[in-house]
Image (spheres, coloured by chain):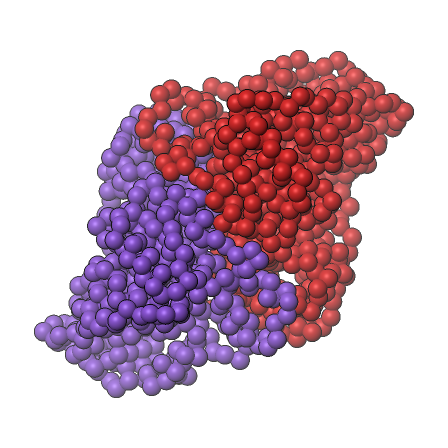
Chain colours: A red, B purple
Amino acid sequence: MNGAESLVKTLLAGDVDVCFANPGTSEMHFVAALDLHPEMRCILTLFEGGATGAADGYFRMTGRLAATLLHLAPGFGNGYANLHNARKAHSAVLNIVGDHADYHLRYDAPLKGDIAGVTRSVSHWVRSSTDAASVAWDGADAIRAAMSGNGRIATLVLPANAAWDKAKGIASSRAPVPPQRPSKTLVAAAAAALWRPGAALFVGGAALYGDLSRVAGQIAARTGCRLMSDYFVPRIERGAGAVDIECLHYPVLENAAILKDVSEIVLLGAGRPVAFFAYPDKPSTPEPAGCPILDLCAPDMDIAWTLKALADLTGAEAVEPALLSLDLPELPQGAMSIENLGQALAALLPEDAVVVNESVTAGQPLADATRHARRHDWLNNPGGAIGEALPLAVGAAVGCPDRKVVVLTGDGSAMYTLQALWTMAREELDVTVVVLANRGYKILWGELANVGVEKPGETAAQMFDLTDPVLDWVSLARGHGVPAARAVDMSQFIAALREGLDRPGPYLIEAVC
Amino acid sequence: MNGAESLVKTLLAGDVDVCFANPGTSEMHFVAALDLHPEMRCILTLFEGGATGAADGYFRMTGRLAATLLHLAPGFGNGYANLHNARKAHSAVLNIVGDHADYHLRYDAPLKGDIAGVTRSVSHWVRSSTDAASVAWDGADAIRAAMSGNGRIATLVLPANAAWDKAKGIASSRAPVPPQRPSKTLVAAAAAALWRPGAALFVGGAALYGDLSRVAGQIAARTGCRLMSDYFVPRIERGAGAVDIECLHYPVLENAAILKDVSEIVLLGAGRPVAFFAYPDKPSTPEPAGCPILDLCAPDMDIAWTLKALADLTGAEAVEPALLSLDLPELPQGAMSIENLGQALAALLPEDAVVVNESVTAGQPLADATRHARRHDWLNNPGGAIGEALPLAVGAAVGCPDRKVVVLTGDGSAMYTLQALWTMAREELDVTVVVLANRGYKILWGELANVGVEKPGETAAQMFDLTDPVLDWVSLARGHGVPAARAVDMSQFIAALREGLDRPGPYLIEAVC
């Protein structure tokens, strides 16, 4: 058994059995080891951002750790943006990055780079194996690091000779570091705060879906506080029967209006709300000046325990949380508009769908329109680096093969990692992609005004505009092996959406809007 | 005048008038400033790797510095791999990376990341402007840093408020740091070495094309030494009338055979030859054991002066260098093969073409076949991070609008940055792209054998194989607005190549081989 095989066995023993891979020469022994272990599902992506974003999506939907296989510093660089997004989503990702054999590093070979520097700049944990005997232990430690703190980015650098030299055996991973819990004093202070008029409980992480969201809803129903979340949360349960959680918006001034009557904020599994960007003469934070913020439980702390403690202290256990009702609109007709698209999605979204949302300017109206649809999970991009939607959908679909995945993405953002379409085709993933083709980086027009530019000129227009030529998404999808249709009015869109939702496997709709 | 405009004016004053851009919100003031200065040519890419690779190609073909405009740490991450390649090519690139306003950095906004860490891991020079008054001076320093050492990666981080606050004026860039020269003793030692039997002069950088390559050829003709270069040189002049420079190959054992009779190596503008990767039981370096290597002039030193000094000392000035002859093959017929493709390219390549080569497994036979074609420049990827060919061609075509650019790329590598096709269409760049569609990462089959794996299994096959589904490059090109044709035999290929070479603007050929 060589180092690479000891690592594959260690991963399997540590419950890691999915690997999103972009291998190169330095990873050949790892690939050979995978050959011996078909129980490791290995999924090829054609660009590393597809692998890292998929691992994020897989974790968000399953809570399980997936590995990525990347090729030296530049391969890691290609996966960087979606690791940034995964980090902001508090997802667990385990990157295995092949490196040159250690004795080859003294030379300036073409692919030699500052692998330590680039990996550390986005990972919580980085280690480079010193020899084959250490690889299994390093792998076990990497799993532990990734699964600690509710999910972290762990990167194991695997020199080629540590992969090909003889190893000693496999290693078993210790349990993740138990997440920290807030003091009872702090919980009591939070409970007292929530009873006061105008209090808001901001929740995040696992409190946004499933049983824990119900506990959060019970606390809110019992104390009368507002139950709120950020806008770009990694995953939130919505639709009929989901707990009613009030989400912030994207623009900071809208959020200031939403929060104007809030007297106190308790954070539980969530960071402090903050403006996406700073703008001249606009605030960096949305809450009223002087509003106290109690940081009860950071996103990497014990969210489940804290919710339970808060429920106990407030006597919320027997209370019914406020739930979202089912309210399906009629199917809209006529011209394409974001409003009509939202209605059609709300009417047709199947029970238990996973919606991946990177629709940027259309995000708020589409989120509003589908809030009372059938029950679904809604995934956002909390890192703001556009180009995660398609890879995230790959990971979600691999993790949840029995659920329909629906992607809502801008055309500009989808272009960043469109290669993920090919992986959807190869793996026959059940994903319907809706590209909202507004032919531009539409949000930047608004942002230009936000930063105080009143009259954009020709260069600005050229920078925001994706016409000349128009991107033909039907051809792009077909080129990747994904069937597709273009819709320019609502009857075409509804027919295409039905087609996508009815058939298994990937399907793309270019919604010209 | 705000900080952003002071920077644009400083760039223009410093002879930087091309910017490959992927702007986001934090760069809005810079975009607005560009609006006021149409003399700055601003070219939109749909993915940051397209911007950084284009800046590399522009520098290689013009010797002029181009800027990139990138969006915070993740945007830089997306451009990382091609900055790695540019660094290995010793190209000058100036990255302008927008960041949050400094007072916003205390919050964990979505796009906040370790911008210092990721930029430093591939840049020679990094600075973050502290305020608007400093931006112009920082820009001037960045230009100087980028243009020193024959070309470096300089990254200027521009906080949003440094861009929007009031600036004091523009700054003029000092001349680049003069490149170091070797001592006369070292030049004399090198000259003495070159006269000895079995000596080889390894040249790189500017010694591989134009007048300086002629000086190198004169020295070789005068002393009788071999004139050689690495395989993946950034740019080399080839074809009829070019100096005859013997290039190494990719496999280290082939290079060991090529160098078996070399008794001494002098490096001039080139690094030491080294195996692309280490392999079990294969050497890391190709020269005979104990072969002395004289490091006369590193790639960032004064190559022109050193060549001249060496020519003076060897009395080479009046000598005629050995030049490549013109030898155009007949147009081949019949089935598609790499050999036939090479012949067709050799026959049809127009005078003064710029060939961008990232054809991986087909690279050696295509390079051999076209060596005696009409005079052309040949650009490789010295960093080994695949996915540079299409962006590099964008930059080369922007820099040399009167020359035909021909891209030879594998299908696997072209997929990494296929968004560059759209920029070719928008800018009407005169580029003919030949995608060598062998439907896989063919080189990895060989690499698997190289590392000692004899019987690849099903997982390995799945990782190397780009069928299921097949990538349809004609659709992919059309989706980006680039006309395209598929060729499955030589008559189709020749017709398509003629079509591409005859028409102005971009054209893509999927050569199924």
The vertical placement of A252 against B473, above or below, is: above
Relative image position of residue B380 (x, y in whole percent): 35, 62
Relative image position of residue B438 (x, y in whole percent): 47, 64
Count of labels in the image: 0
Give the quarter of the figure containing the N terminus of chain B: top left
Q: Quarter of the image holding residue A448?
A: top left
The vertical placement of A288 against A267, above or below, is: above
Going 76% across and 26% down the picture, which residue do you hit?
A240
Going 57% across and 77% down the picture, which residue do you hit?
B452
The vertical placement of A105 against A218, above or below, is: below
B351 with respect to A300 (left or right): left
Relative image position of residue B335 (x, y in whole percent): 39, 69
Going 51% across and 36% down the picture, which residue do you hit?
A486
A434 with respect to A441 (left or right): right
Q: Quarter of the image holding residue B256?
A: bottom left
Q: Is residue A18 visible?
A: yes
